[in-house]
Image: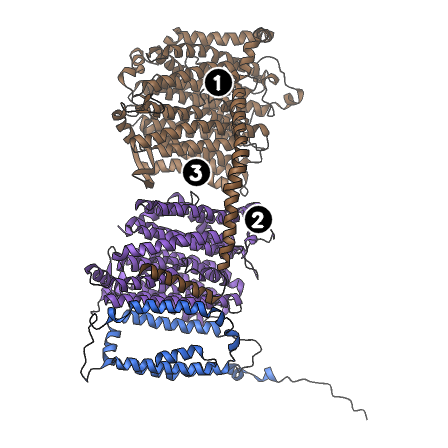
Chain colours: A blue, B brown, C purple
Amino acid sequence: MLLFAATMVVTRRNPVQSALFLVLTFFCTSAIWLLLEAEFLAITLVLVYVGAVMVLFLFVIMMLDVDVAAMRAGFVRYLPIGLLVAIAMVVQLVMVVGPQRFGLDKVAAPIRHAADYSNTEELGQLLYTVYMYPFEIAAFILLIAIVAAISLTLRRRKGVRHQDISKQVRVKRDDRVRLVSMQAEERDD
Amino acid sequence: MDMKSIYLTIVLLPLLGALIAGLTCRVIPRALAHWITISSVALSCGLSLYVGKLFLLDHQEVFNQTIYTWMVVDGLHLQVGFLVDTLTAVMISVVTFVSLMVHIYTIGYMSHDEGYQRFFSYIALFTFAMLMLVMSNNFLQLFFGWEAVGLVSYLLIGFYVKRESAIFANMKAFIVNRVGDFGFILGIAAVAMYFGSLDYVEVFNKAPQLSDTSLSIMGDGSWSVLTVICILLFVGAMGKSAQVPLHVWLPDSMEGPTPISALIHAATMVTAGIFMVARMSPLYELSPTALSFVLIIGATTAFFMGLIGIVQNDIKRVIAYSTLSQLGYMVVALGVSAYAAGIFHLMTHAFFKALLFLAAGSVIIGMHHDQDIRNMGNIRKYMPITYVTFLIGTLALIGFPGFAGFFSKDAIISAVHASSLAGSGYAYWMVLAGVFVTALYSFRLFFIVFHGKERMDDHTREHLKESPWVVTLPLILLAIPSIFIGALAIEPLLFGPLFEGVIKVLPQHDVLETLREEFHGIGAFVLHGMMEPPFWLAMGGLFTAWFVYMKKPQMSEDIKQRLLPLYNILDNKYGFDDFNQKLFAGGSRALGSLLWKGGDVVLIDGLAVNGSAKSIGWFSSILRHIQTGYLYHYAMVMIVALLALLFWFV
Amino acid sequence: MSFDHTMLYLTAPEITLALLASAVLLLDSFLKPSQRVLTYIATLLSLLIVFMVTFATHVDSSLMAFDGQYIRDPMSDVLKLSLFVLMAFVFVYAKDDLRRRGSERGEFYALGLFALLGMMIMISAASFLSLYLGLELLALCLYALVAFQRNSASGSEAAMKYFVLGALASGLLLYGISMVYGATGQLGFAAIAERLQQGQVDAVVMSFGLVFVVLGLAFKLGAVPFHMWVPDVYQGAPTSVTALIGSAPKVAAFAMAMRILVDALPSMQEQWQLMLIILAVLSLAVGNIVAIAQTNIKRMLAYSTISHVGFILLGLIAGTTVGYASAMFYALVYALTALGGFGLLMFISRQGFDAENLHDLKGLNERSPWYALMMMLVLFSMAGVPPTVGFFAKLAVLDAIIRVDLLWLAITAVIFSVIGAFYYLRVIKMMYFDKAECSEPLQASTDTRFALSLNGLAMIGLGIMPSALMSVCASVFA
């Protein structure tokens, strides 16, 4: 199911469709994690990716008109060589990361935990003790991401009409109204 | 201030002055340039004299320390370090003192020259290089100083860059020195190879163990390693100290401004070779063959170069040949193991020869840069101070009793007389005859320039007057040591224990010991000297000069006609120049053009350089196209490379 | 885990810098554009403070903190200290360049400082986890900086390429790390080394992972064939950013290589040695040969970087302490040299005009003899002409290589360096013998001029006295 969904993501012509298949992919992944008893991670995945990221992503896709045909122009030409490389890669991977190396006889199966075992608590314990240093660095990475994104996209264009509240409040009468004393016109009757 | 920082200051101050004056030479005013360099050299000179006093009078301890390790290659330490002992102390005092005098003098001499600031930068730089050379404690730094001195002299000889003869002269000086330096660097390489160290002390300590080692250069002939090293090093000295047959550059180098002739080609740079051999005395002592070689070269130079001086007509060239001849004397002294006498003569010579050059320069200023003595005459009347100081210099040069040159020269001649080394008999006659010749050419010059008829044109005569005080002051200051330094220094330098442990002389070579036994005070030395043949020879030379050039001026013409073949030989300087010019210069040029046309143009340019350049250029433009600029190509390359690596390694 | 004060003491440089960088970011948001110079001063001040903090807390042996996530040893101290110096040069050069482009925004300084933080984390990483995070922190800053000039199409294109390829590379690196984790069950370098020492680790999985890890490394360093991003990014990014990318991160990448290959995988030396040989030879060949065909000087310098990376790799290949020391020396010297080159490029550029093409350098000697001299020193150093420091760097690396009997490799390197000398000398020829195309005087602020002169003179100064830096590098691995 996961593989099918992932393939669909890449092959669909309609970007909205592929985005929806991506959502399916996330669901499948999260299901696998559930099977591995990583409940917290599975939930987070669904909440964060499916709930937040993908929705945002769909918005973007729907707002932008992506020219799919142009993007696919080179696809066919490179398909054979791409396939060749991909197959070679897969063969390699399977050979190395197969059951004969990572089977149950090599790596012991994880111990089954009791029902009151809390995945979340354990994760929190680790995150704030042993892995505190990486955790802090990750925080900084997020900060950088924000800074970078803002600095790359925020710009004050000239000519865009927007309100400057403080300016509006501070405005004085003299700025807006000009009293002009004029010579009274002579009546020509 | 501890000794280390004093030594560093001595060396670095002139460098600092040179850098400031040199780098800002287009910006700073002339006066500032000379104040900066003069004050730096003056301070350096003051400190040097202080160091000299410490060593000569207070018996300061020898200083031998590494200042900075430049790098270590295969156990060979390349470093900068100072070895300061009595020998060094004498040298730095002389170098900085003469240099200071020349600096002051330059203010007057160069006052109208465009390259004023540049000139000061050069001479200060030269002082630095010379100090590095004499204060070094290892061969590498010695080589550095050696080359730096050569470089600056190249720059200075060709100082008048627009004068063709100057360019020719500096080229010649450079190439001839290169020949010498080639021997020198081979010698240093041999030292590094056999001793595994470049440090003086280590090498000297190891030398006796190697005295029996021999190597075969070609064929079956085997050579003592030490002899080979010594002779190679001496070839370097022959280049720098202008010994036959590598002397040809020195007379030509008179193309440079006169202060330079005084500083470099009389007082300091040419003495580098003498100093080096004296410093290497522990090596030379172990090789009688090398000593004989040194002796014969020196004796030949001393006599035959003096002879040429008789026929020269350029005031500076006469002095230049006299320098050659005097250097020959020093080398002779080294050859008979009288190192101290060599250094002693070096010192006295530095003073009186600088004096002579500067006085000659003063005359040249007066003569509006005309250097031909045939246009001079009776200048005594116009330039009294120059006249008196020149006379003092000349008397010192010919070794008139009581003057500086007398003591040193007499010591050398006696030392040669006492020596039993192979070739010392030849050398003795050469140096004796040299005394006569020296007196002859010196007083010939003196009489023609300062006495006799006034041969200059009227315009020059009207403007002929004594030079300004910046010129005469150094003359006077140099005249004083030219008179007294010999009498003052002979006892401590030659017969005292001053050079003990610095210069090493084997007992069987120690000719100075003989002199020491006969020495009974300065007065007795002077009186004794008056009885000896050198004195009478000098007087004979003086008298001959007077008779021929003053009493009967037409006689010189007669002699010239009668001895025309001899005159021609001398005038052509024994044909060294022509020989070099035709055979070496011409030959190497022919060889060069052959290699150029055959080797360079066809083989290297055509095939190797242009061929490879073309093929690389072609290859380069092919490879360049791989960089297409498409993202997916890049990604593809990465993935393919990854796959290749995977298949290779997994 | 236990929390004690030594931990804070050890990580003081990182903590200080993180705080100061955030402070600079905050400070800048309160400043008007005309007061931007304050941000600049604050940035330099921060560098000075971190420098002093690092220097004051320097260590003589290697110490760990944060449960084996963080390591502080003499190597990291020396590298960090030199990074501060390099970054200071970057900021000084960049200031004029940014102002000229009209894009002097405070984010540049903040992102620069955070990039520095990322590099420091990489240098001090003791486990794959912290190493990877440091790498990402650095990379993210660099992506943003490459696109810093928003209205430049080539900048955005370069940033896009850099980002996509970078993401691909770090994905592959991560995969490699997971393989290593899968085989050893450890993330800490020391622990991995210990596991490998004991045996019982699946060799195939390990070499599988190693290939991926080396790939990530090669991408960061810009070694062939993972170099494709280098020329495009160097050319597309504003020169000030190029100067940043081309200098300090190379030092960090060197540290990364040391940590992974030497700290974690010493027992696989035979394998990674061979891989690095392939990468090094390819880098030397492609870098030097393709550089000849370039007309854009930034692109040329990019290829020259690639070839220099080959030399750094050579030092690592030697696999001896002498080799590591020489590679470190080379990386530091190269970073400084490259900075000088880019700094001078920025110096030559002026309002609305980037000095990008080779012929912009023509006749530099007529326009400014002093800076032409500086440029010549820099180029000589890159070409490895004595007595500049570049010569000694090359000499040290080759010496290390010859000592382990890889003579053929040394000869290859020398041949390619000779080829490479051509394009450096060509620039020098243009500067000195060709006629200038414009005669406008060059303008720059005093601090830039000072830094440029210092940078140029360092080439010759370190060249005459290389032993000081050399002995520092050697003592780190003693």
Secondary structure of the residue carrying numbered label 3: helix
- At 33% from the left edge and 53% from the top edge, which residue is drawn? C316
Mark 2 Cα-neighbour bin, 10 Å: few <14, some 14–19, many ≥20: many
Which residue bears the numbered disc 3? B15
Residue C377 at x, y percent in the picture: 47, 47
Q: Locate the C terminus of chain B by quadrant.
A: bottom left
Which residue bears the numbered disc 2? C363
Residue C152 makes an appearance in the image:
no
Q: Chain letter of disc 3?
A: B
Q: Are marks 2 and 3 in contact (CB under 8 Å)?
A: no
Q: Residue furthest right?
A: A189
- At 39% from the left edge and 10% from the top edge, which residue is drawn? B426
Residue B414 at x, y percent in the picture: 36, 12
Residue B640 at x, y percent in the picture: 40, 63
The one of C334 and B558 positioned closer to us in this rendering: C334
Q: Closer to the N terminus: mark 3 or mark 1?
A: 3
Which residue bears the numbered disc 1? B322
Amino acid type at mark 3: Leu
Left or right position of B466 against C190: right
Q: Are marks 2 and 1 in contact (CB under 8 Å)?
A: no
Q: Do the residues indicated by labels 2 and 3 lie within the same chain of the protein? A: no
Could you tell me how far apart the alpha carbons at marks 3 and 1 are, in whole angstroms? 31 Å
Q: Which mark is residue B152?
A: none
